[in-house]
Image: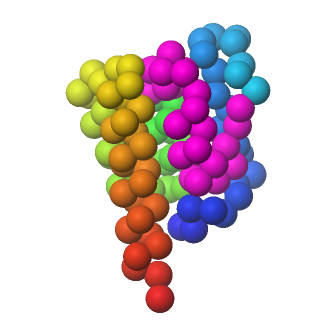
Amino acid sequence: MDPARKVETPFHFYSGMDRPLGIQAQSLLEFLEAVKRVGTDSLEFHLYRGDFERWIKDVFNSAFLHSRISALRRDGVKGEELRRRLVGVLEEWIGFYLYKRP
């Protein structure tokens, strides 16, 4: 899965129910950049609803990313720690993908 590949179903960021931020991601690279800049309230909102896991599973079919993001939810991570760890998971996967390419 190319992290720069655009998908038909973008991820739309919200800060709460019916509170769209007007930020969307159509690739894993765009998702990573959005995670770096949206508020932690948005990250917590989506993590604890299972939105990140669902999008990753449904759109990218990545068991690795799905399980790593699920672990963040199970660990109860919040705030800037959530951002730091989520960025780390995404950068790890993207780095692995880029490294293993011929």
Q: Position of residue 68 (x, y in %)?
A: 32, 45
The quadrant of the picture occupied by the N terminus is bottom right
Residue 8 in view, yes or no: yes
Q: Position of residue 61 (x, y in %)?
A: 50, 56
Of the pair 45 and 63, the residue shown nearer to us: 45
Q: Position of residue 99 (x, y in %)?
A: 40, 76
Residue 42 as seen in the image, left or right of residue 87: right
Farthest bottom residue?
Answer: 102
Q: Which corner quadrant of the image does residue 23 belong to?
A: top right
Residue at 36%, 29% in the rendered image: 82
The secondary structure making up most of the magenta span is: helix
Of the pair 70 and 58, the residue shown nearer to us: 70
Q: Which corner quadrant of the image does residue 69 belong to?
A: top left
Residue 85 as seen in the image, left or right of residue 31: left
Q: Is residue 14 above or below residue 34?
A: above
Q: Is residue 4 above or below residue 86?
A: below
Of the pair 70 and 43, the residue shown nearer to us: 43
Residue at 35%, 20% in the rendered image: 78
Farthest left residue?
Answer: 75
Where are the magenta residues, as a range? 23-49
- Does residue 35 show up magenta in the picture? yes
Q: Position of residue 5 (x, y in %)?
A: 66, 63
Residue 11 as seen in the image, left or right of residue 96: right
Residue at 69%, 12% in the rendered image: 19
Residue at 71%, 19% in the rendered image: 20
Residue 70 in view, yes or no: no
- Does residue 66 show up magenta in the picture? no
Total residue callouts: 0
The image's colour scheme reads rainbow
